[in-house]
Image (cartoon, rainbow, N blue to C red):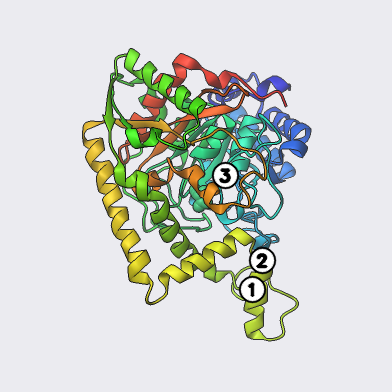
């Protein structure tokens, strides 16, 4: 089975499995061969369960032969960001703290995917505990961008984006707290969808900032994103923030797409800091919508534009300081061998286990929650968060969705921003407010820079209207087909 499978969308692979043109074992072998050929350079995977994946592929082929295939994902390998639990597999969060941890249980998304016959293929590199925008904060070393190995893939789900872009697997899961699915999708030239907060269960996702975290899909095409989202969405009693929403057949909904949408363009998202080539590509995509009958309106999101980054880094770090308190070397995580006494054990274990960015955030988060500062920082940030949410709600009353760049620049050089946290934080300027408002957002490829680096268009939708959002994304994708281009590697 050949290399030509490597860049096929999952929907096409599903057809070929269905017609018997390929087997799941053959498909897994082809993914393994591709991973062996390119991952030494890309470093998307932290680990890969070769034997486990082949065994599940065999099961899938047997089911299919017996006429008992479980649906389109049966037999298709899916890569997991190393923050989502798969029973019996490592769950490291790309941290020394959890370097030797094997998950004893499955996340809800894992249960759902394996019930659909999908094959957990391997663990994907990320910024430690999902904190970062470049995948350089991984304790295991950075992932490279398949389009230019001297550049970052974006982050924190950089491994998930790079694995798809490099043709290692067609589908991966990521998590998005402030942009970590959409931004790496943009920088790697793939489709990344962050669902509405509450649509996909967070049970089994190692927590970073619980009121913002959401698991989502990374894929080559919008149709594949619809396919994967349909398999992981839905209410879950084990996640108290999970919403009781109907899960439509997102893929079938694409065919019913109505067109002629009313689309808002937030004027503040095209100001200073936006790279001119990125701005031009996004504006050309907006023109495509206008030319095909959509109504384009300029809208304004002044609070989101001005305060989202500040509000996010108060709320996200506050929640992180609380969520990461459990890694103390006693209850969870690496235990230091050097400690002199019990208090020193906590101190040494955390000092050894966490990387610099994680420590920076725990310190900031602890500070903003401490008495005397809580009202001035944390509480005020929560109030501004509500105002940002209201601002989006008002704008989305008259618009079906909003269009903007995903990231202000294309992929930057490895090391370029790693010593400047503020410059790194600004790379999420267009994505972070979407998490604060709990809305769904998708990044779709919309062209390349003159240097050959992918550019992403962000589309922001109404809460729980993923079907509409996917249709709007597909409308553009079908006309341009950027997904047919691949890095040469
Ligand atoms: N880059 C942002 C951060 O560092 C967002 C990360 C994410 O979405 N997980 O927090």
Q: Residue furthest bottom?
A: 341
Numbered mark located on residue 201 in the image: none
Vertical side of 126 occupied by 259: above or below: above
| Nearest the eye: 257 or 96 | 96
Secondary structure, mark 1, is loop
| Nearest the eye: 174 or 63 | 174
Task: From the image, tell me which residue sits under label 1.
Answer: 329
Residue 295 occupies which quadrant of the picture?
top left
Marked residue nearer the N-terminal end (3 or 2):
3
The answer to whether marks 1 and 2 mark residues whose Cβ atoms lie closer than 8 Å is: yes
Q: Look at the image and tell me whether residue 373 can be seen.
A: yes
In this picture, residue 53 sits left or right of residue 331: right
The answer to whether marks 1 and 3 mark residues whose Cβ atoms lie closer than 8 Å is: no
Q: Give the distance between the C-alpha atoms of the residues marked 1 and 3, in whole angstroms.
A: 27 Å
Task: From the image, tell me which residue sits under label 3.
Answer: 155
Vertical side of 105 occupied by 217: above or below: above
Ligand 1 within 8 Å of disc 3? The answer is yes
Residue at 60% across, 42% down:
158
Marked residue nearer the N-terminal end (1 or 3):
3
Marked residue nearer the N-terminal end (1 or 2):
1
């Amino acid at each position: 089975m050949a290399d030509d499978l490597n860049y096929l969308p999952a929907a096409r692979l599903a057809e070929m499995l269905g017609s018997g043109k390929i087997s799941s074992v053959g498909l897994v072998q082809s993914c393994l061969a591709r991973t062996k050929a390119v991952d030494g350079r890309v470093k998307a995977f932290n680990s890969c369960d070769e034997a486990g994946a082949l065994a599940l592929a065999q099961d899938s082929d047997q089911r299919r032969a017996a006429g008992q295939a479980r649906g389109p994902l049966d037999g298709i390998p899916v890569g997991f960001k190393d923050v989502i639990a798969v029973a019996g597999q490592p769950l490291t969060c790309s941290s020394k703290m959890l370097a030797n941890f094997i998950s004893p249980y499955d996340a809800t998304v894992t249960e759902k995917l394996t019930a659909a016959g999908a094959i957990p293929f391997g663990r994907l590199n990320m910024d430690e505990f999902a904190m970062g925008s470049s995948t350089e904060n991984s304790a295991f070393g950075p992932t490279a961008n398949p389009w230019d190995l001297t550049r970052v893939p974006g982050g924190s789900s950089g491994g998930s984006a790079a694995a798809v872009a490099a043709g290692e697997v067609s589908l991966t899961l990521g998590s998005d707290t402030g942009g970590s699915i959409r931004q790496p999708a943009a920088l790697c030239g793939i489709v990344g969808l962050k669902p509405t907060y509450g649509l996909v269960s967070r049970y089994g996702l190692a927590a970073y900032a619980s009121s913002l975290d959401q698991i989502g899909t990374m894929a080559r095409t919008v149709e594949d994103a619809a396919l994967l989202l349909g398999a992981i969405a839905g209410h879950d009693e084990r996640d108290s923030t999970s919403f009781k929403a109907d899960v439509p057949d997102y893929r079938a909904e694409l065919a019913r797409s109505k067109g002629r949408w009313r689309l808002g363009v937030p004027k503040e998202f095209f100001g200073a800091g936006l790279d001119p080539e990125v701005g031009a590509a996004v504006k050309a995509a907006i023109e495509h919508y206008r030319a095909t009958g959509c109504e384009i309106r300029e809208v304004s999101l002044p609070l989101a534009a001005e305060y989202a980054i500040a509000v996010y880094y108060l709320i996200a770090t506050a929640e992180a300081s609380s969520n990461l308190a459990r890694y103390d070397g006693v209850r969870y995580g690496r235990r230091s061998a050097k400690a002199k006494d019990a208090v020193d054990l906590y101190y040494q274990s955390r000092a050894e286990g966490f990387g610099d960015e994680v420590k920076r955030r725990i310190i900031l988060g602890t500070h903003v929650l401490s008495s005397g500062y809580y009202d001035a920082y944390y509480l005020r940030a929560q109030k501004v968060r509500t105002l940002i949410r209201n601002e989006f709600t008002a704008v989305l009353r008259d618009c079906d969705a909003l269009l903007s760049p995903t990231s202000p620049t294309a992929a930057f050089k490895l090391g370029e921003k790693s010593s400047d946290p503020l410059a790194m934080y600004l790379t999420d300027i267009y994505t972070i407010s979407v998490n604060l408002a709990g809305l769904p957002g998708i990044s779709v490829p919309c062209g390349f820079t003159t240097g050959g680096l992918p550019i992403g268009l962000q589309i922001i939708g109404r809460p729980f209207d993923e079907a509409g959002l996917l249709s709007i994304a597909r409308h553009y994708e079908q006309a341009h087909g950027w997904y047919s281009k691949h890095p040469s590697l």
